[in-house]
Amino acid sequence: MNLATEAADATGSGPAALEVTDASVAIGGRPVLRGITLGVPAGQFVALLGANGSGKSTLVRAVTGLRPLSGGEVRLFGTALADFGDWHRVGFVPQRASAASGVPASVWEIVASGRLTRRRWLRPLRRHDRRAIADALEVVGLADRARDGVATLSGGQQQRVLIARALAGEPELFVLDEPTAGVDLPNQRTLATSLGLLKERGATVLLVAHELGPLAPLVDRAVVMRDGRVAYDGPPLVEDDEHASLLDARHAHHHHDHHPGPVQHPHAPHVASPLDAAADREGHPWTS
Amino acid sequence: MDILTLDFMVRAMIAAAFTGLAAPAVGTYLVQRRLALMGDGIGHVAVTGVALGLLTGTSPTWTAVIVATLGAVLIEVIRERGHANGDVALALLFYGGIAGGVLITGIADQSANQLNAYLFGSITTISGADVWATMALAALVIVVCVGLMPQMFAVAQDQEFARVAGLSVRFHNVLVAVLAAVTVTVAMRTVGLLLVSALMVVPVATAQQVTRSFRTTLGLAMGLGTVASLGGLVLSAFASYQWRVSPGPTIVVLALAGFVVMWPIGAWLRRRQRLRAPFAEVPVIGHDVTDEEHPHVHGDDCGHPAVPHGDHVDYVHDGHRHAPHGSHYDEH
């Protein structure tokens, strides 16, 4: 039994929302991700952290099928990625500076396009579709801007539009690629409120971030990427703590003893490799 | 008014109306994907198709449809493979298409005049069969562009999201390319291959000056396209009593005139919208009373923009933001 399925069994609720087993990705023949193993049980809020170029966005693109794997396996809700067809169960928020394009589009129209995962061709919107769209706008606090052109919104508001679009499909697993990039603090707080609502509703969240900021209290588990590998996987570290000492502590003892916390972290792929030693030498891996 | 009831004129007007509806419909998706010049690229490729028709003695319309479609798909493939930027891919086809067309026309021993009819349009010489072909192809384009709007909008808006939503991005991209190729050949008789892109793009550019949503942009662009192509045709018909005026350029100039009229309106609307955008709610630092006696009472229709600011309203007034406070105004 591999570690990821072990993690899923620990929560005792069916297959994990996301299971990555020994996955590697090569871009143009150059290995970018190597040996990634990661299981995300249903209902967990996972933050994927790491420096620029550490491979966190590539990992997110690999689990959503946007990047082909060069090895290993990705399973969504227990189904291998190649056979996976229930895309309405996944809500993706790509990394985009703006939600606008060459032609004006209203906030409502963009959010409504998220409903396509559940709509058939040439069918009009049903009442339930409209309710889901209105609800998504409500969650991100933009219900009063529905009719406005998306280009007139601020950067932070446009990020919330993209989240509402993912939300409109009523997915179980959210994958967000740097939703807080380039968003000011007040808007990050609003974003955190929206994501907090999702978490209360039991959504599984995999979120890529450079730094957590106001999202920190929501995070159940932090996965830190470094140079295409998982460098840390466990309870979120408190940002103000002395990072180096935490990492040292982690090596001295098994860190479960140190962070009792909400122990739902399945946490398997603890990599004790030369890489970790390197991380220690150079200090905190995700501030480098 | 007699001229409008002549057979050739009626045929021309039907063709113009259908072209005017179809071209901006595809054009909206091209502009949305920031590929406004794609219609031009396909138009140039279609020149080779027309020349092949002249060479082989088959209908230039159908050879143009085939060659333009192949060219459009080729542009998509080059773009998708990422070997060249979208604009470089277009440039390659621009030059290849026009050079091939002129070369083949020469080999076919046809005069340049023959090609001119396709380069700049010759809507008044359109045959009955061509009108039917135009109507059928244009109707197909309109039905797909309007019927598949949710899917095509989503893919053009955000390809990555569309892919994760389970839509086939490649299918939709090729679909838009093929629709654009069909539209180019349909509009070839109306405005000509060299001006076809104008009918696809200019009405969209005009419409988006005043619209806020995709759906209204698409609808308004189709309306403006029809007005321009019908209006341009009729205008040129009456003008031709006096001057040598061809319909193709008249249609395009009329469409551009529409843009020139709409642009200041759009600029004014955008300015007004910016003025009325609510001010950010920030904790007040101090209580700043306006300096002198205020000679003016702000109100609902005092002429100064009233902008929401938290729980009250600020009146924008000579670079100040005046908020009523008891008997005086605060500077916010």
Image (spheres, rainbow, N blue to C red):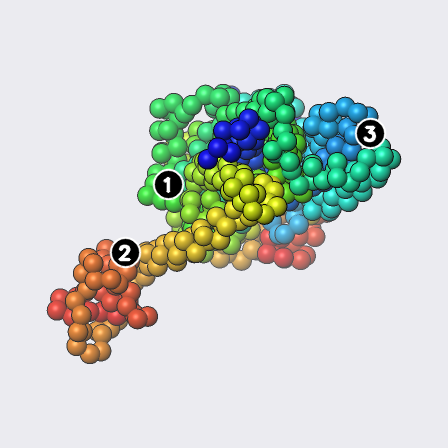
Left of B301 or right of it: where is A35? right
Kindly identify the amino acid type of the residue bearing the numbered disc 3.
Leu
Kindly identify the amino acid type of the residue bearing the numbered disc 2.
Pro
Q: Chain of mark 1?
A: A
Dots 2 and 3 on the same chain: yes
| Residue found farthest to the bottom | B292
**In the depicted structure, whether residue B106 falls above or below residue B273:** above
Residue hosting label 1: A146
Q: Quadrant of the C terminus of chain A?
A: bottom right
- Residue under the image location 19 percent in, 57 percent down: B300
Residue count near mark 3 (Cα–Cα under 10 Å), binned few <14, some 14–19, many ≥20: some
Give the Cα distance between marks 1 and 3.
Answer: 56 Å
Residue B111: give x, y in percent of width and height. Answer: 80, 38
Q: Quadrant of residue A18?
A: top right
Q: Secondary structure at mark 2?
A: strand
Q: Is residue B175 visible?
A: no
Residue A137: give x, y in percent of width and height. Answer: 38, 38
- Residue under the image location 48 percent in, 24 percent down: A118
